[in-house]
Image (cartoon, helix red, strand yellow):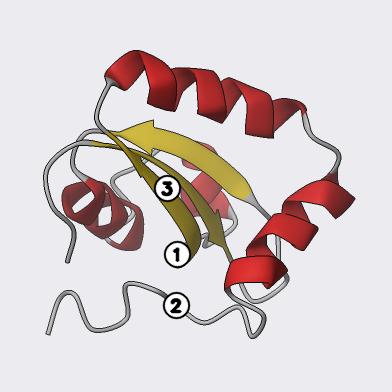
Amino acid sequence: MTDSGFYVYMLSNVSRTLYIGFTNDLGRRILEHRQKKADSFTRDYNITILVYFEAFERADDAIAREKQLKKWRREKKIWLIERENPKWLDLAESWFD
């Protein structure tokens, strides 16, 4: 799983609909999305696949990055994901075994 800190993450579904979020506990938050306890958008569109994340020591840095990513065009977000995770694998696939 991940160490403590603050995280910006991108989730997707099989249709590659994207969601960007911020948390101080990435494992817990991903589990909430998978258990459909998260907001209605991710629940309604079954957005549960962790395709990208960044870790930060400071909350304000993570929040600033989240805001920056949310302003990006979809093409740039896809470029960022595919640079680090070209096959769009679920980065949290083994976290909850």
Element type where label 1 sits in the image: strand
Give the crowd class for mark 1: few <14, some 14-19, many >=20 residues within 10 Å: many
Q: How far across and down, in percent of the image, does residue 70 sit?
A: 67, 30
- The amino acid at mark 2 is Asp
Which image quarter: residue 50?
bottom left
Q: Residues within 10 Å of mark 2 (few under 14, many from 20)?
A: some
Q: Is residue 83 left or right of residue 78?
A: left
29 and 5: which is toward the camera? 5
Residue lying at 52% horizontally and 62% vertically, measured from the top left: 46
Question: Where the C terminus falls, by quadrant?
Answer: bottom left
Residue annotated with mark 1: 50
Res. 90 mark: 2
Q: Residue at x 52, y 82 (%)?
A: 89
The span from disc 2 to disc 3 (Cα, nearest Å) is 15 Å
Residue sitting at 27 percent across and 22 percent down? 58
Quarter of the picture holding the N terminus: bottom left
The amino acid type of the residue labelled 3 equals: Glu
Q: Give the Cα distance between marks 1 and 3.
A: 11 Å
Give the foreground label among 1 and 3: 3
Q: Position of residue 35 (x, y in %)?
A: 27, 60
The x and y percentages for residue 82 are 70, 70
Comes first in the chain, label 1 or label 2: 1
Measured as percent of width and height from the top left, residue 85 is found at 58, 75
**Which structural element holds mark 3?**
strand
> What whole-number distance in Å separates the C-alpha atoms at marks 1 and 2?
5 Å
- Furthest residue toward front: 57
What residue do we see at 21% from left, 34% from top?
Answer: 24
Mark 3 highlights which residue?
A: 54
> Is residue 72 rendered to the left or right of residue 90?
right
Q: Assess whether mark 2 and mark 1 are in contact (beta carbons under 8 angstroms).
A: yes
* Quadrant in the picture for residue 38: top left
Q: Residues within 10 Å of mark 3 (few under 14, many from 20)?
A: few
